[in-house]
Image (cartoon, helix red, strand yellow):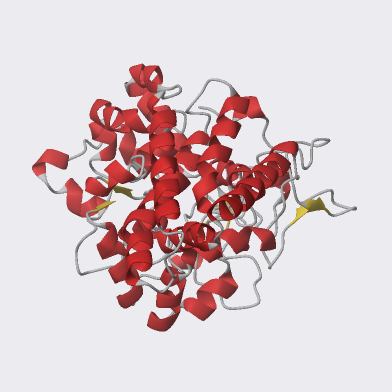
Amino acid sequence: MFDIADPSQARLRAGVVKGTQPDSNGTAARAARISPPESLVEDHFFWTYTEEPHRSRRKAILKAHPEVTKLCGPEPLTKWVVLLVVSIQFTCAYLLRNTPILDWKFLATAYMIGATANQNLFLAIHEISHNLAFKSPFANRLLAIFANLPIGLPYSAAFRPYHLTHHKSLGVTGLDTDLPTAVEAFFLDSILGKTFFCTFQILFYAVRPMFIYSPPFTSIHLLNLAVQLSVDYILCRATDSYQPLFYFIASSFLAGSLHPCAGHFIAEHYFFSKVTSGGTESLAELKVKPQSKVSPTHPLESLQPPETYSYYGPLNILTYNVGLHNEHHDFPAIPWTKLHKLHEIAPDFYEPLPCHRSWVWVIWTFILDANVGPWCRVKRSQGGRIVGGGGKSDTKTKVPSGRAGEGISAASAGPDGEEGDGWKESEIQC
C-alpha cells in the first residue's frame, strides 16, 4: 500500500532527511521507503523518510476549513464522566471484597464491568493528557491522578510524556513507544505469538517504554505514586481485604487483553492494507465509490497514504471517541465530544481514508491473518522530539541514546544547545 517507489531507488540510508535523495549515480531520486537502521534481527517494518501525515493534513484542513479551530479547548463533561466511572469501580470493588478471585462473579464483573470501566479510564487519562478537561494544566494532572485510582497502579503521570511524544514523533524509532521493537516483532510474528501479544498487550505498553528512553521523574510522578499507594492501602484496610485491589488490577489487565474495547490499541496504527478478507476498506477502494470520489486537484491527493485508522462504531461511546483516531491525531486539542463535528466539517478529508468496521474483527484478523502482524507498522528514523526531555546523551555527540536498538536521531534531540530539552508545554497544543 505504501511502497510506491521503484525498488532499485528505495534502498536509501536511514539517516536522511525528507526530500530528494541521491541514487547510485549521484542524481536525485525521490522514494517513500528507506532501508531500516541496523538491527539485531532482519527488519520487515515499512521505513519511510516522509513527514508524518497528520501535520500535512492538519494544514490542508485549516486552509480549507479554518472554522475547525473553534472546536479546540477543554470539555467540562469529562470530569463528570470520570467521577461516574470511578464511583462505579469503587462500588464494584467494595461489593466484591469477600468474593474469591476465581469465583465466576468476580471474573464476570472484572471482565464485563471492570475492564470496560478501566479502559474508559485509560482513555480519560489519554484525553486529560492533552489538557482537555480543564484550562489549568495542574488541574488536569490532578484529575488524571484521580482517574488513575481504579487502575490500581500509578500510571497517569508516566503516560503523559510518552503519549505526547507519540503525537509529536509518530513512527519515529526510539521516540514513539507505541511502536513494537524489531525483537518483539520477530518473536511474535506467528499465530501463537500474536495471540500472546493480544492477551498481554497491556504489559507490552507498560514495559516497552522502559527499554526505549526515560523522561525525567517529576513532582507529578511522585504525587501520582503517593496518592495511588495511599488509596490502595486505605481501601484494603477499610475493607479488611485485598480483593478490592485485586479487582482493580484484574480490571486493568483485562481492559488491555482480549476485550472488545482493547481492539483500539491495534486498530489505531497497524496497517491492514494487505488483508484481503474485508473489514477495512482501502483508500483506493473508497475512491471508486461515487460518494467518496476525490478530485485530482483536492489537497488530499498530495498527502501521504495514512498510517492511522479510524473506527466509527458504537464502542466509541465507551471510549471517549478514541476510534476517531485520524481526527484526534490531526487535531489533538479538539476534545472527544467534538471529534464527530470535525469529521462533519471536513468529510472530504476523512471519508476517503481507510477505517475499521469492528474492533473485535481487528483483534481476530490480527491474530489469524498472515498478512497483518507486528511488522505492519510505518517507521521513520528522523523527525519529532521528546516531550519533556529525557534519555541519556552521548557525551561526544550530545545525542540522546535509545535502548533495545532503538536509537534516537540527532534531529530528535532538538536544536544545538537544547539537546534533551524536548518540547515545551506551550508547543504541544495545536
Residue 318 x, y percent position in the rendering: 31, 45
**Residue 24 visible at all:** no
Q: Residue at x 59, y 42 (%)?
A: 160
Q: Residue at x 51, y 23 (%)?
A: 134
Q: Nearer the viewer, residue 381 or 311?
A: 311
Q: Quadrant of the N terminus?
A: bottom left
| Image quadrant in which you'd find residue 140 | top right
State the residue lying farthest toward the left: 290
Residue 198 x, y percent position in the rendering: 42, 69
**Residue 154 visible at all:** yes
Vertical comparison of 380 with 59: above or below: below
Q: Residue at x 44, y 54 (%)?
A: 93
Residue 122 x, y percent position in the rendering: 47, 47
Residue 191 x, y percent position in the rendering: 38, 81
Relative horizontal placement of residue 341, taking residue 141 as reference (left or right): left
Q: Residue at x 38, y 17 (%)?
A: 70
